[in-house]
Amino acid sequence: MVTSIHTKKPAQWLALYFPHLALDQLDRSGQHDTPLAISDQQAGRRCIIDHNQAAQDLGIHIGMPAGTALNLADSLQLTARNQDAEQTSLERIAAWCYQYSSQVCIVPQRNGLLLEVAASRHLFGVVETLAERIDKELEQLGYHALSGSAPTPEAAHLAARHGLHIHTSDAIRKSIGALSIDTLQLQVTQLQTLKKTGFRTVAEVFRLPRKALTRRLGPAVSNYLDRLLGQCPDPCKSFHPAGSFSTGMDLPETAHTQGLVFPLKRLVQELCGVLRARDRGIQTLQIHLQLAVEATSISLTLRQITRSESHLMTLLRDRLERLQLPQPVRHIQLVAASFLPFAATQEDLLSETGLPSTDAANAVIEHLQARLGENAVKGLKGREDYRPEHSWSLRELDETATCTELPQRPTWLLAKPQACRIDTYHILAGPERIETGWWDGEDCRRDYFVVRDPDGSTLWAFHEYKPRPGWYLHGLFA
């Protein structure tokens, strides 16, 4: 008898580190060419903690006092660090990352995320391939990320800062050992004590007996190293995304709607990533534009649930073409108030659009509504009236269409009957007598005939006795 023993698959943590998270929030639009810098309180004074290339070209550097930076560059846009906004950004990115892992953890004190990706290998390949893919897609969203992986969360954090991928617990000592002790996530005083003692690399710290290390620096350092090497548990709290989405970005003053397309595409890409992660779709979408002194909004109400980036961007481009901006736009915000269950449909092999026929028809309707306005696109329904011009009316697209089938009549009527001469046509069928309308003041008496013209087209003509006697052309058969 053979007994199979199932062992738990070793964990593999992919860490994402965002060294410029505060700056990315200001510059996600990719349209700022002005010097930007972030300041924070350090050692009792406000200093520069990050800046863009334009600020660096003016001599701004990290650690410079904020007052000195402002005196050096009058055009510098200096913003105080907002840790609440950074936390919100990490939560949005974490929700987006759910498409690659079912366990995502936020580590705000490290400006980073952790993804458990051992179970993702059969979908996305080895961890190096997945990390490269995530880094590239995050860059398309406007975030600069460094990534690395290791079997323990603490080792993954260090690996991300140095672009390392450590595959086994036994390899942690060797891979991280060559790094400077400054890379360890320890307090400044603890690092200073280690340096005074003569330690320079992490490997040297690993070789120090735990009892001696605990006696010198306390149990917190020993506990950290044990978690780093996987010698004690290091539980991580998983993040659970919400069932809605809201994100935005500041813009340099944008006076033309064409300038909104690129930042809007980044926001839609992020939304669609979150929708894929949750296996959800949306049917309504709001775009809020903060202008110089007022605000305006764009609303999309779709006929079908979607999470297609290309479909949403096509509709939004159509809406932007109709939008007139009275003032420049300073901020753009995208809101999807509720997620809906999404059912993927089988594509039609012979369809040119790649969509099932019903979805393709809905896509055309949505495209027309976005371009012309929602109230400009209507459906048709039948009315119980023998007069052809009164036998139909407009309906809302969601309203059920009712119509009595009259196969002997054409589906295409002329906007207004045109006078004609019957002797130029060949009569094929008829007459169909219509005499009605006395109750609404538009009474008529006509005889309708199916006729063919010299070119072979089948037409619909009538002989009217009242109110305007004569022959008229009224419709065309397909």
Image (spheres, helix red, strand yellow):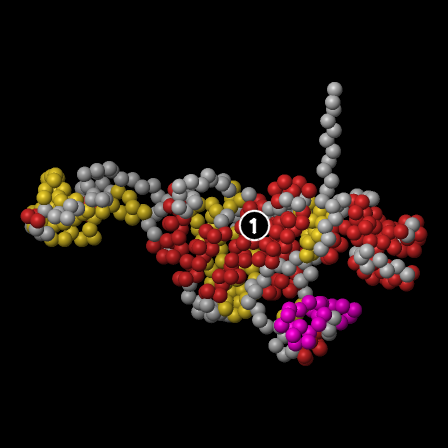
Quadrant of the image containing the C terminus:
top left
Q: Nearer the viewer, residue 343 or 333?
A: 343
How many marks the image carries: the answer is: 1
Q: Is residue 44 magenta?
A: yes
Percent position (x, y) of residue 275?
55, 47
Q: Nearer the viewer, residue 132 or 78?
A: 132
Give residue 231's quadrant in the image.
Answer: top right
The residue most toward the top is 1
Give residue 35's quadrant in the image.
Answer: bottom right
The residue at 45%/41% (across/down) is: 347
Q: Is residue 184 magenta?
A: no
Q: Nearer the viewer, residue 332 or 364?
A: 364
Percent position (x, y) of residue 338?
53, 48
The residue at 52%/52% (across/down) is: 336
Quadrant of the image containing the N terminus:
top right
The residue at 62%/62% (across/down) is: 25
Percent position (x, y) of residue 350?
40, 41
Which portion, as a residue range, is magenta?
A: 39-62
> Can see residue 22?
yes
Percent position (x, y) of residue 189?
85, 61
The residue at 83%/62% (across/down) is: 188
Q: Helix, strand, or loop for circle 1?
A: helix
> Can see residue 374?
no
Q: Amino acid at mark 1?
A: Gly
* Residue identifier under label 1: 273
222 sits to left or right of 276: right
Graded by Cα atoms within 10 Å as few (under 14), some (14 to 19) or many (20 or more), the crowding at tag 1 reads many
